[in-house]
Image (cartoon, grey):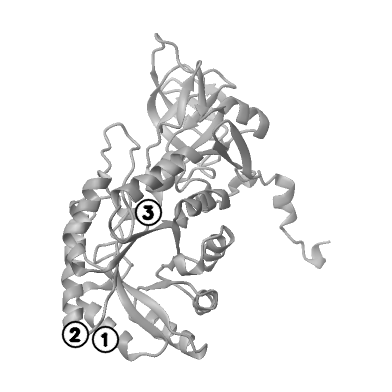
Amino acid sequence: MTAFTYRNGQLHAEGVPLATIAEAVGTPVYVYSTAELTANYRRYADAFAGQDVHIHYALKANSNQAVIRTLARLGAGADVVSAGEMRRALAAGIAAKDIVFSGVGKTREEMAAAIEAGIGQINVESLPELEVLSEVAAARGATVDIAFRVNPDVDAKTHAKISTGKADNKFGVEYDRAREAFARAAALPGVRPVGIAVHIGSQLTDIAPYRAAYTRVAELARALRADGIGLDLIDLGGGLGVRYRPEDTPPDYAAYAAMVREVVGPLGCRLACEPGRSLVASAGVLLSRVVYHKPGSARSFLIVDAAMNDLLRPSLYDAFHPIRPVLEPGAGAEAAPIDIVGPVCESGDTFAKQRPLPPVADGELVVFDVAGAYGAVMASTYNTRPQVPEVLVDGDRYAVVRPRIEVEALIAQDKVPAWLE
């Protein structure tokens, strides 16, 4: 979070005081840093220098057009999991050939849209999906490059809700059925099997599960080549972790790239990877204002104007986000435990329990750090709360890259039938 630092007693996003943004845009608001986005992308690019690796940004982490375009200008392609995300990637200037279409439940309509757009790679996750894709492509006289997402049955040792590579997860073709799937694809019209894809989960802080997964992928690739299936692509997936807690130890990118070179490099395939969280998480904060302190006999609460509809991760995953005041605490300020909660009518609208926090007065600003991934993209308008806006900072300038959707606009989306007029 080097882009979000205290200067002269005020927390800044690069060269812009967060208090300035709060005054102009209101709170809650997401604020993103161009410098941090750039630094995060370059960590991957530098680590993989000398290897034939294409970086595809996973839009599901943050699909704001300004964020996508920033990464696209650095050289990123896109990984999408819906036709809507595909359209976002194209609108942000990413070429269709640089888009990977993933996802376990693609519809015929989405397949047709991807084929018509000329998407470079479709990752297939089941034999039924393969049959449908073949039919859709052949009906259009097209042949599409596919990679099978293979489930290697490797435990990523991460949260159960973001684990995707175990046998009991819904994703991918079972490892033991992969050769059967490739053989079937080779016999079908409209599809050209060119690669193996794997993705074992999110927020991994140890590269050992990757080594285990990629070792299985390499073994499968050699077996497929013995079967006469020509492969020229290994899709490594994403999932490298970030630091939410001080004790988190994200993988070293150079060590990860070296392991990739060692395990799958001898196959001579071009490589793809699809980072999401690790590109955008540390590049964003959620800026919020304290509404009230609510003292209690059992515990006290700090009620802020952000809520679970703005940042769902703590309610959904019990996720941890660092929280700090925008006004820099004095040298002698003592932190005291307090529950930090939002105003939504749910007990689950809780960001932190008994979190040590220096004194923050009513009306002052706080930030939720490392909030650039799975924040605004998962937001809702629950309790008819205006949808949170987003701001992008670049040096000493900033712009609103998604306006607040006000209550009047929300209500106007509803249509009352004639019999209720």
Quadrant of residue 222 within the rendered picture = bottom left
Q: Secondary structure at mark 3?
A: loop
Where residue 176 appears, x then y in whole percent? 19, 76
Decide which of tag 2 and tag 3 comes sooner along the chain: 2
Please name the amino acid that badge 3 sits on.
Answer: Pro
Query: Which sits in the foreground, 306 or 275?
Result: 275
Query: In this rendering, would 160 be left or right of 131?
Result: left
Query: In this rendering, would 413 be left or right of 274?
Result: right
Query: Which sits in the foreground, 247 or 345?
Result: 247
- Labelled pair 2, 3 in contact (Cβ < 8 Å): no
- Is residue 420 depicted above or below 329 in this figure? below
- Labelled pair 2, 1 in contact (Cβ < 8 Å): yes
Please name the amino acid that badge 1 sits on.
Answer: Ala
Where residue 95 appears, x then y in whole percent? 51, 65
Q: How many residues crowd mark 2 within 10 Å: few (<14), some (14–19), many (20+)?
A: few
Q: How many residues crowd mark 1 within 10 Å: few (<14), some (14–19), many (20+)?
A: some
Number of numbered discs overlaid on the protein picture: 3
Residue that numbered label 3 is attached to:
275
Where residue 227 appears, x then y in whole percent? 19, 85
Residue that numbered label 2 is attached to:
227
Q: Residue at x 19, y 73 (%)?
A: 220
Q: Secondary structure at mark 1?
A: helix
